[in-house]
Amino acid sequence: MRQGGKSPWEAWRKETEIGIHQIEGIRIGQARDEQGATGCTVILCPKGAVTGVDVRGSAPAGRETETIKPGNVCDVAHAVVLSGGSAFGLDAASGVMEYLEEQGIGFDVGLTRVPIVCGASLFDLTVGSHKARPDKAMGKRACLDAVPGKEILQGNHGAGTGASIGKLLGETYMMKSGLGACCFQLGELKVGAVVAVNALGDVFDLDTGEQIGGLLSEDGKSLRLTEPLMYERYGKDKNYFTANTNTTIGCVITNAVLDQAQAGKVAGIAHDGMARTIAPVHTWADGDTIFTMATGEVKGDPNAVGTLAARAMGYAINRAVREASAAYGLVCAGELEK
């Protein structure tokens, strides 16, 4: 709802928003193959962060997601890798593993240290070259890019390089998306989100509900809604859509003290931010996955952390669309008719 033409959240955002690079103990680096249209985003926590995960989509490509679930021995991860390349892109985590081992980071097993590196990949093989995939070398380059205090590049960068949205009718009517980030500070508490948006559905402004991206019209100059078209086509042909070529992947980062179960719950609540800005979402054709990394510096109510994470995730998703540039034959939000 708007009041006097402005969102009631605008003033609050100006007072509370910070850069996600301002969360201490966290470093974010990126690498991409711009020509091949793929890339990866690496979130490093050398001291280890309590990490949880919540997978809502039915076509995920993930790494070490079972390791960090409650009831298992390990509750700390040293990195989360978001990448393109579908399941092939999980190989980028090998470069992150190598980098962290070289830095002496990980669990001491006597002979060496074993870092815990979690990850998720989105499907961007139909954009650019399907042979271009994040690999071990790219993962390591992203680690070298992770300079403390460095601001994160959004749009066509990292895991968002080849991201797209609005794919119900295939490549002809989809549009460019990318990577987005947003972070807030309440007192000493900091909560942020990084997300690569590669959804089957459309994207809507978190505050106003206005459609800002997704399925293109027949002439490619404006937008139309995916959901009603899905229902219309279903009535004619129940097998109208079977491709599993999507997935929105992200990570909540916070300095809050959380245990493993709470970290997983925060990731689950953060999915609400995804559900408030993407529709349809969490489908059989998506592999939607959110991690939470908590550095444990500040005591905070997990309910407040999760609720703030959902808002940060929603704004990050909006930025992933708004900051994306036209590329690979796909139009971006800035080129559409208003």
Image: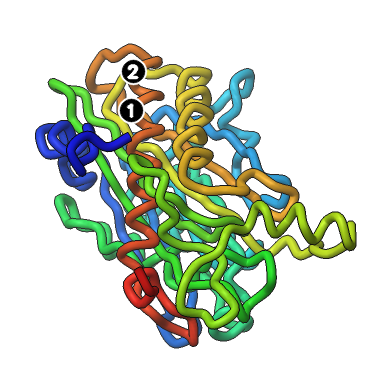
Name the secondary structure under disc 2.
Answer: helix
- Residue 263's x, y, as percent? 46, 25
Relative to the observer, which residue lies in front, 325 or 191?
325
Q: CA distance from mark 1 to mark 2?
A: 6 Å
Name the secondary structure under disc 1.
Answer: helix
Q: What is the three-letter code of the residue carrying label 2?
A: Ala
Relative to the observer, which residue lies in front, 82 or 283?
283
Residue 105 seen in this snapshot: no
Label number found at residue 55: none
Viewed as shown, does residue 306 lie left or right of 168? left
Residue designated by label 2: 304
Quadrant of the rendered image containing residue 77: top left
- Label 1, residues with CA under 10 Å away: few <14, some 14-19, many ≥20: many
Quadrant of the rendered image containing residue 3: top left
Specify the farthest residue to the left.
15
Residue at the spot 41% in from the left edge and 44% down from the top edge: 209
Residue at the spot 89% in from the left edge and 62% down from the top edge: 237
Q: Is residue 252 above or below residue 221?
A: above
Residue 33 seen in this snapshot: yes
- Residue 337's x, y, as percent? 38, 74
- Label 2, residues with CA under 10 Å away: few <14, some 14-19, many ≥20: few
- Residue 150's x, y, as percent? 17, 56
Label number found at residue 308: 1
Relative to the observer, which residue lies in front, 300 or 217?
217
